[in-house]
Image (cartoon, rainbow, N blue to C red):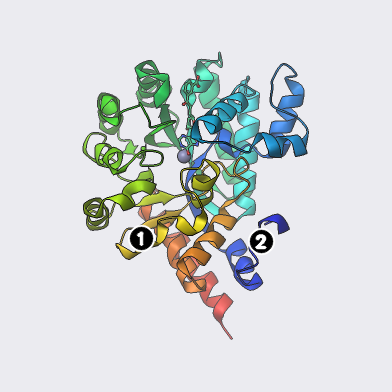
């Protein structure tokens, strides 16, 4: 972690514990993980883009007035990814950044529609992500899996295309495990996506839509009822509905909580007002994630430090949080046990006198 991200209210040794803690990341976007170095390299390569290539200007560019502004900026970065080699490089570098943070397993949300509609060949796109996935696992030991998400605001044409790319046996990549729904929620009702989620689920994919990030608890109910969500992306506004909190806890539907993202997109005013504490109090399985880390000036380690502060966690509490993510993942049982054992061994060794 860079010094810029060190929270002075957290003891330095807790930061050190987090930095080496084996972790799983369940909610992180492909393009949203492009490091400033990659964005600046691509922006310099494509001079017609409005994305600045200067690192300082980039920090300003990644300051958002609201969620709509965030999506506008996000799409300008999408515009920089123009060839299968850009896709491969981005994916491989994202894996490197995850590995540096001791992330053993990550489910990366990819929006293939945004790339194919911009002219990248669909087969070449799949080959690029798979090639990077295999290289990353061999070289860094980080296991990557994919979630293909519908960019809801782009309409049902994007839903159809995403469902096709996710379920066509000639295209569907080996690493694909789940199906999601992203983008703005306002004016994009969840129920209209039911047929596409039905197809994805029938093809063996797991359902992980974003919901309750920028709209209320009714969107989370819709995601559960119509899209058969097994985890909820964000779910932030669930706190407004005690019945929903009880349901999420009872059914053990994990929330993919991304605290800094919620502040950066102005979905929540301040970290101290974040409802994560209410989720834990309600008995919900909380997982900690980074969403679009460089765009939000964060990384997964920093999100764990934020959680430690907001939930008043020590090393054992942080280890439990890390195990929640492993348990809520779509990794197979032996894979889950391996990472959970590694977390326990690491924690006990750290705490040994
Ligand atoms: O690609 C297009 O042409 C396009 C056209 C219209 C709308 C869209 C989108 O809305 C793309 C949204 C994009 O945002 C990603 N994302 C990243 N972080 C988040 C988040 O915290 N909440 C929701 N969406 C997020 C998402 O994966 C989509 O790729 C695209
Ligand atoms: Zn997200």
State the residue at coordinates (21%, 38%): 225
Q: Foreground residue, 241 or 349?
A: 241
Residue 206 coordinates in the image, percent (x, y):
32, 39
In the picture, measured across the screen, residue 156 lies left or right of residue 19, that is left
Helix, strand or loop at mark 2 = loop
Residue 258 coordinates in the image, percent (x, y):
48, 49
Q: Which label is found at residue 98?
A: none
Residue 322 coordinates in the image, percent (x, y):
46, 61
Classify mark 1: residues with Cα within 10 Å, few (<14), some (14-19) or many (20+): some
304 vs 131: above or below: below
Which quadrant of the view contains residue 302?
bottom right
User: Could you tell me which quadrant the C terminus lies in?
Assistant: bottom right
User: Could you tell me which quadrant the N terminus lies in?
Assistant: bottom right
Which quadrant of the view contains residue 102?
bottom right
In the picture, measured across the screen, residue 221 lies left or right of residue 132, that is left
According to the image, label 2 marks what residue? 6
* N-term mark: 2 or 1: 2
Q: Which label is found at residue 278?
A: 1
Residue reaching furthest to the bottom:
353
Q: Foreground residue, 147 or 1?
A: 1
Circle nearer the viewer, 2 or 1 = 1
Classify mark 2: residues with Cα within 10 Å, few (<14), some (14-19) or many (20+): some
In the picture, measured across the screen, residue 154 lies left or right of residue 264, that is left
- The reply to whether the C-beta atoms of the residues labelled 2 and 1 are less than 8 Å apart is no
Helix, strand or loop at mark 1 = helix
235 vs 335: above or below: above
Residue 293 coordinates in the image, percent (x, y):
58, 44
The answer to whether any part of residue 259 appears in the image is yes
325 vs 84: above or below: below
State the residue at coordinates (65%, 39%): 93
Per the model, the C-alpha gap separating discs 2 and 1 is 25 Å
The answer to whether any part of residue 342 appears in the image is no
């Amino acid at each position: 972690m860079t010094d810029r991200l060190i929270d002075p209210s957290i003891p330095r040794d807790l930061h050190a514990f987090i930095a080496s803690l084996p972790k799983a990341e369940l909610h992180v976007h492909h393009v949203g993980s492009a490091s400033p170095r990659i964005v600046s390299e691509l922006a310099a390569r494509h001079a017609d883009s409005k994305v600045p290539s200067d690192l300082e200007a980039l920090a300003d560019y990644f300051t958002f007035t609201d969620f709509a502004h965030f999506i506008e900026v996000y799409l300008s970065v999408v515009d920089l990814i123009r060839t299968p080699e850009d896709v491969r490089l981005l994916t491989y570098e994202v894996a490197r950044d995850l590995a540096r943070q001791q992330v053993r397993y990550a489910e990366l949300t990819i929006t293939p529609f945004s790339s194919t509609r911009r002219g990248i060949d669909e087969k070449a796109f799949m080959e690029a992500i798979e090639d990077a996935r295999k290289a990353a696992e061999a070289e860094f030991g980080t296991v990557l899996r994919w979630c293909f998400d519908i960019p809801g605001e782009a309409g049902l044409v994007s839903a159809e295309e995403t469902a096709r790319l996710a379920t066509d046996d000639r295209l569907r990549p080996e690493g694909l495990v789940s199906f999601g729904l992203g983008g703005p929620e306002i004016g994009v009702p969840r129920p209209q996506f039911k047929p596409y989620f039905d197809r994805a689920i029938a093809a063996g994919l797991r359902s992980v839509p974003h919901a309750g990030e920028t709209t209320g608890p009714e969107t989370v109910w819709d995601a559960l009822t119509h899209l058969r969500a097994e985890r909820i992306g964000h779910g932030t506004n669930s706190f407004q509905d005690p019945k929903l909190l009880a349901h999420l806890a009872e059914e053990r539907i994990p929330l993919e909580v991304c605290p800094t993202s919620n502040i950066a997109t102005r979905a929540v005013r301040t970290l101290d007002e974040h409802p994560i504490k209410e989720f834990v109090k309600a008995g919900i399985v909380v997982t900690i994630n980074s969403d679009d880390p460089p765009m939000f000036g964060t990384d997964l380690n920093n999100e764990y430090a934020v959680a430690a502060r907001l939930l008043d966690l020590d090393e054992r509490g942080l280890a439990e949080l890390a195990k929640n993510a492993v348990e809520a993942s779509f990794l197979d049982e032996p894979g889950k046990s391996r990472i959970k054992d590694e977390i326990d061994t690491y924690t006990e060794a750290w705490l040994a006198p």
